[in-house]
Image (cartoon, helix red, strand yellow):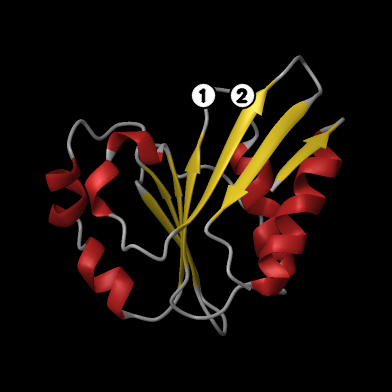
Amino acid sequence: MKIITNNEQETIRQGYILGKKLSAGDVIALYGGLGAGKTAFTRGIAQGLGLSADISSPTFTIVNEYLSDPSLFHFDMYRLSHEDELYDIGWDDYLERGGICVVEWSENVPGAFPPETITVTLTRVDDNIRQIEIANLNK
């Protein structure tokens, strides 16, 4: 499924639509360069899950936890150089906790995802326009 958004609010809205379809245990791998809209899309996912928290990129902390039912675990792999580092921070434990894992910079940890992972590729077309491609969404 390919979607074009014309501003940040529309990107958030598409995340919201996806968030409404998610359930405990889902993993979403986000792909896209700097400024592609990954964090904005994640804000929308959080809203779709009913979270009102201020969602920001966990670039320096690697993961932000938003406890709810189900919980949202928001990862940023930008600073990781290899997927082994992801396992060092307890990736398996997060998967087993039954929350929803949203991972920015998934390119950096390609072998870490279960087969049923939903992939979202965000491409910056220009300052405002984004192309969003969602794959493996069987809901």
In front: 109, or 117? Answer: 117
Give the CA distance from mark 2 to mark 1. 6 Å
Q: Residue, x 52% and y 42% (percent of image)?
A: 57
Provide the residue designation for mark 1: 33
Q: Position of residue 28 (x, y in %)?
A: 49, 57
Asked if residue 33 shows in the view, the reply is yes
Residue 100 as seen in the image, left or right of residue 98: right
- Residue drawn at (34%, 46%), measured in percent from left and top? 62
The picture places residue 78, in percent across and down from the top left corner, at 36, 32
Q: Quadrant of residue 23?
A: bottom right
Q: Using residue 89 as the reference point, say whether residue 119 is left or right of it.
A: right
Q: Secondary structure at mark 1?
A: loop
Q: Is residue 51 visible?
A: no
Amino acid tagged 2: Gly
Residue 125 - label:
none
Give the left or right position of residue 78, taking residue 2 as reference: left
For the residues bearing labels 2 and 1, Cβ distance under 8 angstroms: yes
SS at mark 2?
A: loop
Which residue lies at the image location 56% right of the left edge and 85% below the top edge?
69
Tell which of 88 and 134 is nearer to you.
134
- Residue at 69% from the left image edge and 62% from the top image edge: 18
Q: Amino acid at mark 1?
A: Gly
Q: Which residue is mark 2?
A: 35
In this rendering, the answer to whether 47 lies above or below 10 is below
Q: Nearer the viewer, mark 2 or mark 1?
A: 1
